[in-house]
Image: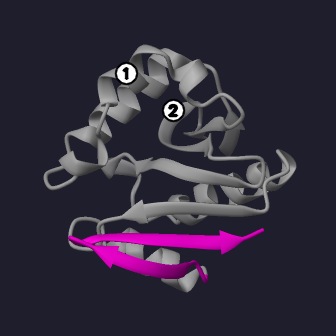
Amino acid sequence: MTEIKCSEDYSTIKDLFVEYSGIKGAEGCFVSFDKELADLKNFYSGGAILLGYEDDAPFGCIAIKKVDDNICEAKRLYIKPEFRGKGYARIMLNSMIAQARELGYKEVCFTTRPDVMGVAYKLYKRMRFEELGCDNGVVSMRINL
C-alpha cells in the first residue's frame, strides 16, 4: 500500500534529506543545509514536509517552503534508489501540489539541475511546469495552482 502524508517525523525526514544531499552533482542544492536540518519545523513554517510510504517503509519526500502569501517553493523531492521506476515522483509532486493548494498558495516555484536530475527534469516538463530561465545549469520552474 502506498501512502503520502504530511509529517513531523523529523528523524526520518533528516535521514532522507541527508541521503539526497549525497547525490553527486547536487551539492549546490544544499546551501545553508546545516541551518535547515537544525530547525526543520521553523524552516518549513507555513509549508509542509510530505513523506511517501510503501507498506510502512519511507520511500521518499518533498517539502513546501513559504516564499510569501501566494507563492511557495517545492524543495527536496527525493525518491530512494530502490523505489525508483514506480511512478512515485509523480505521486509526490501531485501530492505536493494538492497540499500547496490546501495551504492557499497560488503558485509553486522551484529550481533543478537537469544535468544531475535529468529524469526529474523531464517529469517536470511532462507535468507542464513552466521553465523560467537557466543560470549556471540551474533551471527555475513554476506552475500556477
Identify the residue shown where x is 62% and y is 47%: 67
Looking at the image, the residue that sits furthest to the front is: 68
Identify the residue shown where x is 75% and y is 51%: 100
Report if the CB atoms under discs 2 and 1 are less than 8 Å apart.
no
| Location of residue 138 (image quadrant) | bottom left
Most common secondary structure along the magenta stretch? strand
Position of residue 144 relative to residue 3, above or below, is below
Please, what is the three-letter code of the amino acid marked with disc 2? Ala
Instruction: Name the image quarter holding the C terminus.
Output: bottom right
Residue wearing tag 2 = 57
Left or right: 115 as drawn, with respect to 75:
left
Identify the residue shown where x is 63% and y is 20%: 8
Q: Secondary structure at mark 2?
A: strand
Mark 2 crowd level (few <14, some 14–19, many ≥20, 10 Å Cα): few
Identify the magenta region. 128-145
Instruction: Name the image quarter holding the N terminus.
Output: top right
